Amino acid sequence: MMENVPDMMNHGGENVAELVAKSLSDEGYEVRYTLLNASWYGTPQTRERMILIGIHRDCGIEPQFPKPTHHVDLPKGYEGTKSTARRVVKDYGSNHHRFVADPFASLPPATTAADALADLPHIYALDLFRKGELRRGMKDPREVCYYTSSEPTTGWSRLMRCWDGFATTTATTGHVFRYLPRDFKIFAELQPGWQYPRIWEHVEAKISRWIERRRHQGLSTDARTGEVRDFIQDWRIPYDPSKFPNKWWVLDANKPVRTLLAHLGKDSYSHIHYDADQARTITVREAARLQGFPDGFQFAGSMNPAFKQIGNSVPPLFSYAIAVAMRSMLGVPIKPSSDLRVKHLGLTHTLIKTTAGHE
């Protein structure tokens, strides 16, 4: 089994996934590959990946993919990825690619950000900052935090707290976030779903209104000196909104989140908490929850490496769904239905046939 980014199917106009499939076919493998989305399998994240499965022809088994178990309306941009893949496959030909159709709306809804982050304590960053209780410096992902409820309150929090081999009771670790003194006050004014251009406009409009009030009061509006200069420096976000549309993004509590990237190790503006009262970016544990790491799993190193490890990984439940499908292909039964992962995925029919003509 091979996993990689969707661009594997269109890297500089070359379908690398097809090249890999042909090489494996020459070595005696029956190969299929497609695009799958982690949110289709219960993970609260619209992470799309190319998945390739090969089984040696001596086994007499055709590779198949796990049937989606959850429905989600994907954001703009995902259909473009699929359209590009279709075009590349059509232009260059493929005996190995198969399309998996979007899940039916009758399936259970995708896990949302609010489902995922339930039971983790609220951290009111702006309040803490104004009280002088936040400090710059290294944050430890092993730091302990206690749940807000004695029992899990959502299906996802139950899965994260009761994962076999990683179960927790009253506490987890790594509920630590970045020290961003300029931006806590900005985060407090943002709305769910806002992206960088909208956020930039909001801040610029705030600066303009403040200067206009000074003008009406007969005060200086010279941006080069004094109080005006300081106010602008304290609020202005210095990135061109036409070049960095995805640099900042506020989570929507009622939807899965966008893909967590390894870039989280450098900054986490791509995932700002949906609760403006908390006024911060997500914590390491929240990123782990959104990726699907159980609460008993601890990350090595300091905060930045922990974020990077999460962004570089494959969501565990996504991996599990693919593993269950591969076991089923090989005639190996899945674990008992008491396994919470099986229950969350609703794994009653696990495979999608990939014979020619079936999409």
Image (cartoon, rainbow, N blue to C red):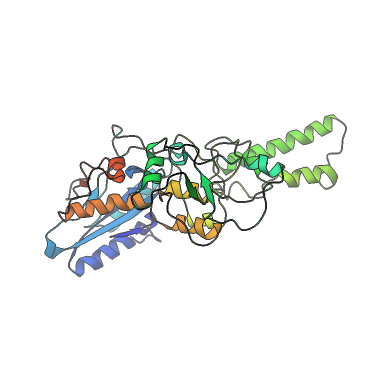
Does residue 237 appear in this view?
yes
Does residue 259 appear in this view?
no
Q: Nearer the viewer, residue 322 or 162?
A: 162
Q: Residue furthest top?
A: 216
The quarter of the image holding the N terminus is bottom left
Residue at the (31%, 33%) spot, across then down: 105
Tell me where residue 41 appears, x and y as whole percent: 32, 44
Tell me where residue 255 appears, x and y as whole percent: 44, 37
Does residue 116 appear to the left or right of 35 in the view shown? right
Residue at the (68%, 44%) spot, across then down: 129
Q: Residue furthest bottom?
A: 27
Q: Nearer the viewer, residue 67 or 225?
A: 67
Q: Nearer the viewer, residue 327 or 100?
A: 327
158 up-or-down from 354: above or below: above
64 up-or-down from 155: above or below: below
Tell me where residue 233 appears, x and y as whole percent: 74, 47
The quadrant in which residue 227 appears is: top right
Residue at the (40%, 36%) spot, across then down: 154
The quarter of the image holding the C terminus is top left
The quadrant in which residue 339 appears is: top left
Residue at the (26%, 48%) spot, across then down: 99
Q: Nearer the viewer, residue 339 or 291?
A: 339
Does residue 351 appear to the left or right of 171 in the view shown? left
Tell me where residue 329 appears, x and y as whole percent: 17, 53
